[in-house]
Amino acid sequence: MNIPELSTALANVQLTNQVGIAVLDKALESSEVTGQSLINMMDRSMELSVNPSVGGSIDLLI
């Protein structure tokens, strides 16, 4: 077996693994930010839904 070729192949595998982990880390961060935004949006909508006076009437001019 050729040692330099094996060393290069192992280095390529290690680099590929590191890139894959970095991409997954970014995807996880993005999912966390999206999830937090969704939670904030739901909190705001729940706050408005328990206030019965909000959206109960419409002002019209004819």
Image: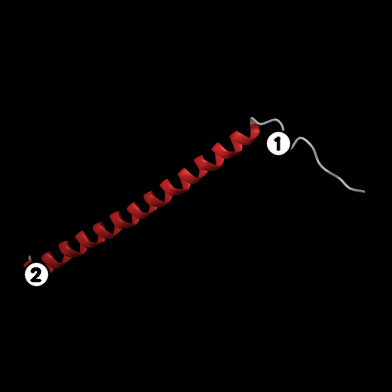
Front residue of this view, candidates 53 and 26: 53
The structure residue drawn at horizontal position 9% and vertical position 69%, both measured from the top left corner, is 4
Q: Residue at x 24, y 58 (%)?
A: 18
How many residues crowd around disc 1 within 10 Å: few (fewer than 14), some, or many (20 or more)? few
- Residue closest to the eye, 24 or 9: 24
**Quadrant occupied by the N terminus:** bottom left
Task: Place residue 19 in its image quadrant.
Answer: bottom left
Give the residue type at disc 1.
Answer: Val
Q: Which residue is mark 1?
A: 54
The image quarter in which residue 14 lies: bottom left
Q: Is residue 41 visible?
A: yes
Image position of 31 with respect to 47: above or below: below
Above or below: residue 14 compared with residue 48: below
Q: Residue at x 57, y 39 (%)?
A: 44
Evaluate if marks 1 and 2 touch, with contact meaning CB atoms under 8 Å apart: no
Instruction: Give above or below for 37 relative to 12.
Output: above
Q: Is residue 29 above or below residue 19?
A: above
Q: Position of residue 29 (x, y in %)?
A: 38, 50
- Return the mark for residue 20: none
Q: Is residue 19 left or right of residue 34?
A: left
Q: Which x, y percent locates residue 52?
A: 70, 30
Write the residue at 86% across / 45% down. 60
Which residue was labeled with disc 2?
Answer: 4
